[in-house]
Image (cartoon, grey):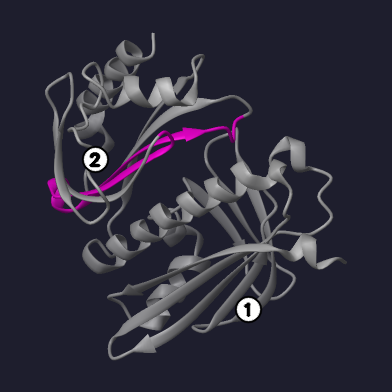
Amino acid sequence: MSEKKKAREHAHEFEIAAPPGEVWKSITDAETLANWFPFEARVEPGPGGQIVLRWGPELECVCRVEVWEPDRHLRTTWMEKPGTLEGASLPLAVDWRIEGKKGSTILRLVHSGFEAGKEWDEYYDGTRRGWEFELRSLQLYLGRHRGERRTVTWVRRPITCSTEEAWDRVTGPRGLRLPAPPPVAGSRTTLTTAAGDKFAGEVLACERPVNLAMSLDSFGGSLLRYGHETCFGRPEAQIWLYTWGVPASDLAPLRGRLEATMEEALP
């Protein structure tokens, strides 16, 4: 196979305040996976087994296990592909490597197999942004909320305008009210939405027009993300709020306000 088709991968490294065994459990145990990554999971352990990740009835990702070395190394295929890439000849793969470090763990993830053609650009960049956010979720879960059940507040809205216009609307006066000038990663900011909700914390990413992510002070430590997504076959604006130890019923009023905000911003 040509080197051109092996041209791209993205790598992510995080230090996690937990021992290697806890990190391994978090990436290989179905119940624990659902506390930071998918809505639900199913795991058949060992080489030749599989990890099935689900985000509701519309999206399922089947990952065949190629390497299973507890507390050290997990390698799986990554079967979720955009429809335009179904004929891709190079399998996508995800390598998880775990290394202990004086009571904490260094986790390195490499997602490989992205071909060099422009038709792969959106998928490559989308998975890169996604992993950065989801690994922050793992870091926060193990560091501050270990053993607590996660609640995902997820708001979706179809986009019929351009990606840039959708960003300006959702982050503008009728939406999340992102301060001007836009904050940079590592800075602190506060979003005061059109509905009056306040989200204060550290900016993890601010990449117009596709990605805004924050680590919030509220709910004892939580995560917020706005993103432009196409994984359901159409462009959508999505807001994700991850909280731990907070019942979904307590978050229902906030969810309703976020839905109303999205509807107002993207009528």
Residue 57 drawn above or below residue 38? above
Give percent across and percent down for residue 95.
Answer: 59, 71
The residue furthest front is 181
Nearer the observer: mark 2 or 1; the answer is 1
Three-letter residue code for mark 1? Trp
Q: Residue at x 60, y 31 (%)?
A: 232
- Asked if marks 2 and 1 touch (Cβ < 8 Å), the reply is no
| Left or right, residue 88 beside residue 60 | right
Give percent across and percent down for residue 29.
Answer: 49, 65
Q: Is residue 250 visible?
A: yes
| Left or right, residue 253 beside residue 39 | left
Q: Residue at x 47, y 50 (%)?
A: 130
Give percent across and percent down for residue 215.
Answer: 23, 51
Residue 258 drawn above or below residue 44? above
In magenta stretch: residue 246: no
In the rendering, which numbered label is found on residue 247?
Answer: 2
Q: Is residue 81 visible?
A: no
Q: Which residue is mark 1?
A: 68
Q: Which residues are magenta?
A: 209-232
Give percent across and percent down for residue 48.
Answer: 75, 71
The C terminus lies in quadrant: top left
Residue 71 drawn above or below residue 93? below
The N terminus lies in quadrant: bottom right
Residue nearest the observer in this picture, 93 or 113:
113
The residue furthest right is 1
The residue furthest bottom is 102
Badge 1: residue crowd in 10 Å (few <14, some 14–19, many ≥20):
some
Three-letter residue code for mark 2? Pro
